[in-house]
Amino acid sequence: MTVVANPFDAGGYTLSEMTRAINILPNMYSRLAQIGLFRFEGITQRSVIIEQREGVLSLLPSVPLGAPATVGTREGRSMRSFALPWIPHNDVILPADIQGVPALGSRSNADTLVDVMTRKLTLMRNKHAQTREYMEINALRGIVKDGAGTTLYDYFTEFGITQISVDFLLGTAGTKVQQKVRDVIRQIELNLKGESMTGVRALVSPEFFDKLIGHSSVATAYQYYSASGAQPLREDVRRSFPFAGITFEEYNPIFTLSGGTTDRAIPAGEGIAFPMGTVDTFTTYGAPANLIETANTVGLPIYARQMPRERGDGIDLLTEASILPVNKRPALAVRLFSSN
């Protein structure tokens, strides 16, 4: 009898190799990653301690053994510990996945185990990426949710911070929208508090975007901007409409939650404005995997490993992530809406 060796067992791909592979697979669903908003930072523990000082949230540093400890302020609700959620996702390769199934682009050769595993890892990678995008857009708005839509942390409530909102009054013909935009920029500049920025971007719902470009004080500017391209009637300019100092972008992903329901990234008629090019405001922290060999190591965005079943009837693919996005300056994310 011929024994078919599993190329991913001992002597094949290790945890480190599979983790490296899944982290470099293309990310198919992450607009926030495309614009580089949240930077990733690995930590060695499964929780972070965050302190608030004058509206700015900061992580407590580690110190050498025996050195003086950092001292927290004595104001109420000034220091909190946040556990990083654990997000495991598994799949399995069964004999039916490769038995007699033609390989892609071929009518005769069956899919190899490597091809099947790559496709499954890519799908698993995309699910993790979509979950991270969902968590980060909500963290930008001040509330971290998991893939089930459950609120994990409300940073405004945790630290007693009031979110800044600007009513654009887009239903009023006489509204000076440029002034509203300047109000948003000034609020962001006022709350930078030691940070720097290269510009301001706003992710807005389709309803807000349509009201914005339809307003009498904006319509002419939008008309000239949309006509500046070679094919103005063919190109979609909803991704980038600069107006009075803010680049507005229609952002309307609808996430399918783990329970089958859906949730919009931005509520209807609203938007969120935030600074671009910051150094240390938007961070997604990652903890090590829940494994002995990764304990006390610096966390990675995603971990992947495989475990052949003892009976030889399949290979389990195991992935996990432990991430927590944090907006360290919640006042920099300004809520936009129109009350009419």
Image (tube, rainbow, N blue to C red):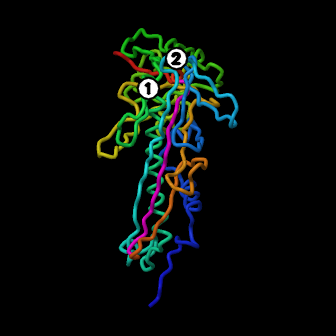
The front one of 142 and 107 is 142
The question of residue 320 being in magenta is answered with yes
Q: Residue at x 42, y 15 (%)?
A: 167
**Residue 338 x, y percent position in the rendering:** 38, 18
- For the record, the magenta segment spans 313-329
Disc number placed over residue 184 in the picture, else none? 2
Of the 4 image quadrants, the one containing the N terminus is bottom left
Please state which amino acid type lies under the numbered disc 2: Val
Please state which amino acid type lies under the numbered disc 1: Gly
On screen, residue 54 above or below 294: above
The Cα–Cα distance between marks 2 and 1, rounded to whole angstroms, is: 12 Å
Q: Residue at x 46, y 49 (%)?
A: 128
Which secondary structure lies at badge 1? strand
Residue that badge 1 annotates: 271
**Residue 42 x, y percent position in the rendering:** 59, 43
Q: Residue at x 32, y 40 (%)?
A: 262
Query: Does label 2 or label 1 sit earlier along the sequence?
Result: 2
Which secondary structure lies at badge 2? helix
